[in-house]
Amino acid sequence: MKTLNHYIIYGTLITSAVNAQAAKTPAATIQNINTMDTEKLSNPIVKQAIDALQSGDKQAWFSLFTNDAQLFDDGNKMDFKTFFEKALGHERFTSIDKVEQNGLHLYGKFHSDQWGGFKTYFKFTIGAGNKISKLEIGQAG
């Protein structure tokens, strides 16, 4: 019985410590740790693409691109499908700081599970059938 009482006391102390820490952390931070405001995205196709990127939704992401979509990473041509098969679910914007060219060019802070955080740009080209035909990405200065 004495051991059970110790577990109850330890459990109560741990719960109190966790609750005290949670009280110091804003609720929005706890609930929205991986969300980002996409209201700045004025182009609906780009917004859908960024929403898919943010959630790691491969089906939604690839459905927005042409079958022969081109990808350039810091000016180097990459295999679009292979690159994003690996990146989706592991890379995302943490903020969108600037949107230009009628919503097709985005600049912001980015997080990669492999490379960490950095400033980046995404430049979309939308072609026939309202599908994205080209995406240029890279580190922004």
Image: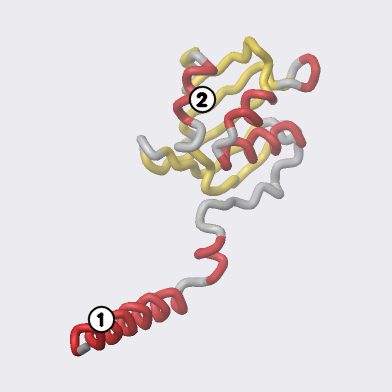
Which residue occupies the extreme right position in the image? Answer: 129
- Counting from the top left corner in percent of width and height, residue 69 is at 62, 14
Describe the element under mark 1 as helix, strand or loop: helix
Residue 88 versus residue 12: which sits nearer the camera?
12
Residue 110 sits above or below residue 7 on the image:
above
Which residue occupies the extreme front position in the image? Answer: 1
Amino acid on which the number 2 mark rests in the picture: Phe
Decide which of tag 2 and tag 1 comes sooner along the chain: 1
Residue 103 versus residue 59: which sits nearer the camera?
59
For the N terminus, which image quadrant?
bottom left
Which residue occupies the extreme left position in the image? Answer: 2
| Residue picked out by circle 1 | 7
Describe the element under mark 2 as helix, strand or loop: helix
- Counting from the top left corner in percent of width and height, residue 123 is at 62, 27
Q: Residues within 10 Å of mark 1 (few under 14, many from 20)?
A: few
- At 51% across and 25% down in the image, what residue appears? 84
Disc number lying in front (2 or 1): 1
- Counting from the top left corner in percent of width and height, residue 7 is at 25, 81
User: In terms of image quadrants, where is residue 103?
Assistant: top right
Residue 103 versus residue 78: which sits nearer the camera?
78
- At 71% across and 49% down in the image, what residue appears? 39
Q: Which mark is residue 84?
A: 2
- At 57% across and 41% down in the image, what residue appears? 54
Amino acid on which the number 1 mark rests in the picture: Tyr
In the rendered view, does 68 fall on the left or right side of 19? right
Q: CA distance from mark 2 to mark 1?
A: 48 Å
Residue 24 sits above or below residue 96 on the image:
below
- Counting from the top left corner in percent of width and height, residue 136 is at 57, 23
